[in-house]
Amino acid sequence: DAKTTQPTSMDCAEGRAANLPCNHSTISGNEYVYWYRQIHSQGPQYIIHGLKNNETNEMASLIITEDRKSSTLILPHATLRDTAVYYCIVRVDFGNEKLTFGTGTRLTIIP
Amino acid sequence: DTAVSQTPKYLVTQMGNDKSIKCEQNLGHDTMYWYKQDSKKFLKIMFSYNNKELIINETVPNRFSPKSPDKAHLNLHINSLELGDSAVYFCASNHASGLQYFGPGTRLLVL
């Protein structure tokens, strides 16, 4: 799996959009970008994933650059419950592939 | 209903003991995993089973033996527990789309 680089930590004011960047410059053509988050003491939770088009769901939006070497996860209106470690992971999109977690970004939402 | 459940949630035991952690998923997924999260919060794959067959073993010591009695269950048995085994162990199951669903974790403390 390609490696990813994320900032160690970020702060965001409550109610603002949180933009979490991820670099994956060695991503292969068949690898997707996945985002998971881990709220303190809980199991990781899937957020969103995409291949090359921008994606949006009820939790977040994912913006992938045209060259696919980086992406940004956007939480449009951050709440205190969004405080967590956010992991950007690249992997091929077929059933049995493991997730290779990096160190992630610790996002703190400030009241 | 809980999608992926683990028991026990907490496990405190003495060095040298043998213990088991159980995992069950009611999602009908074919693939299940065990991940270990150490004190530095690194989350790493240990094992993966697909339809009761081992498909990933990430150089985990022989003291760790996963067992899958059916595709809804993946249990982890640990022999001769060591201090370094103290960690949070997460079970996960994988949807065919590639999304992984994690359990709440089992916090193991070896004294």
Image (cartoon, grey):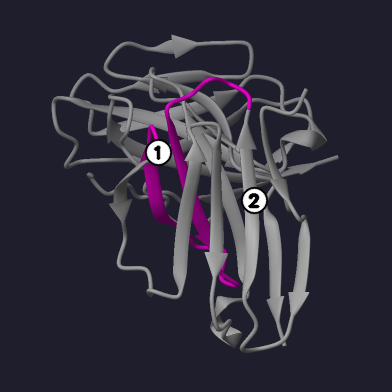
Magenta highlight range: B26-52
Q: Quadrant of the C terminus of chain B?
A: bottom right
Q: Secondary structure at mark 1?
A: loop
Q: Is residue A40 visible?
A: no
Which residue type carries mark 2? Lys
Whole-percent x, y for residue B65 in the image: 45, 63
- Residue tagged 1: B52
The chain carrying label 1 is B
- Residue tagged 2: B22
Task: Say which residue appears at 78% left-offset and 30% top-offset.
Answer: A79
Whole-percent x, y for residue A103 in the image: 47, 57
Q: Is residue A111 left or right of residue A97?
A: right
- Up/down of A3 relative to A63, above or below: below
Task: Say which residue appears at 31% left-offset and 57% top-offset.
Answer: B57
Whole-percent x, y for residue B30 in the image: 42, 27
Which quadrant would residue A37 be assigned to in this image?
top right
The chain carrying label 2 is B
Whole-percent x, y for residue B106 in the image: 69, 57
